[in-house]
Image: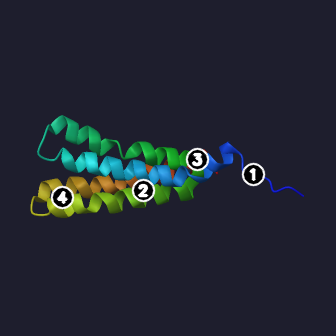
Amino acid sequence: MPEQTPSKKSLLRDLTPLWLLIALIAITVLHDENVSGSALLHEISQRLYYLPIIYAAYRYGLQGGLTASLVSAALYFPHIVQHWNRRDSAINMYAETILFLVIGAVTGLLAGK
């Protein structure tokens, strides 16, 4: 019996978590590079974390949303440490990581997978 080769679609599907991780790393690099630059670009790049979180939650449900949220928070944590001494800024960044988890969980639950 000839061996079945995986379809192109299933191969791409298997790579989705890798692409999500690459996207989160790219967003982290972009966000870190904009620290001393434009405040607007810094804020926009910070909000880009939500796109892979929402996609992962939609695609993989609650587990995907929470996983992407935790990875985002872990990648974002060095930025928090960098600004640790600025209390008002640190509180805002902690709130951001909590929102990562809330958005991932709510979107995952709504996706119902």
Which residue is label 4 attached to? Answer: 90
Which image quadrant for residue 79?
Answer: bottom left
Residue depicted at 53% across the width and 49% down the height? 57
Classify mark 3: helix, strand or loop: helix
Q: CA distance from mark 2 to mark 1?
A: 34 Å
Q: Are marks 2 and 4 in contact (CB under 8 Å)?
A: no
Q: Amino acid at mark 2?
A: Ser
Mark 3 sits on what residue? 59
Disc 1: which residue: 5
* Residue at horizontal 45 percent and vertical 55 percent from the top: 68
Task: Tell me the kind of residue under disc 4.
Answer: Ala
Q: Amino acid at mark 3?
A: Arg
Query: Disc 2 designates what residue?
Result: 69
- SS category of the residue bearing label 2: helix
User: Which of disc 1 and disc 3 is earlier in sequence?
Assistant: 1
Residue 63 image point, x, y percent:
55, 59
Q: Dot 4 lies on which element? A: helix
C-alpha span from label 3 to label 4: 31 Å
Q: Is residue 113 left or right of residue 57?
A: right
Q: Is 16 on the left-hand or right-hand side of 33? A: right
In percent of the image, x 28 and y 45: which residue is there? Answer: 46
Crowdedness near tag 2: few (<14), some (14–19) or many (≥20) residues, C-alpha within 10 Å = many
Q: CA distance from mark 2 to mark 3?
A: 14 Å
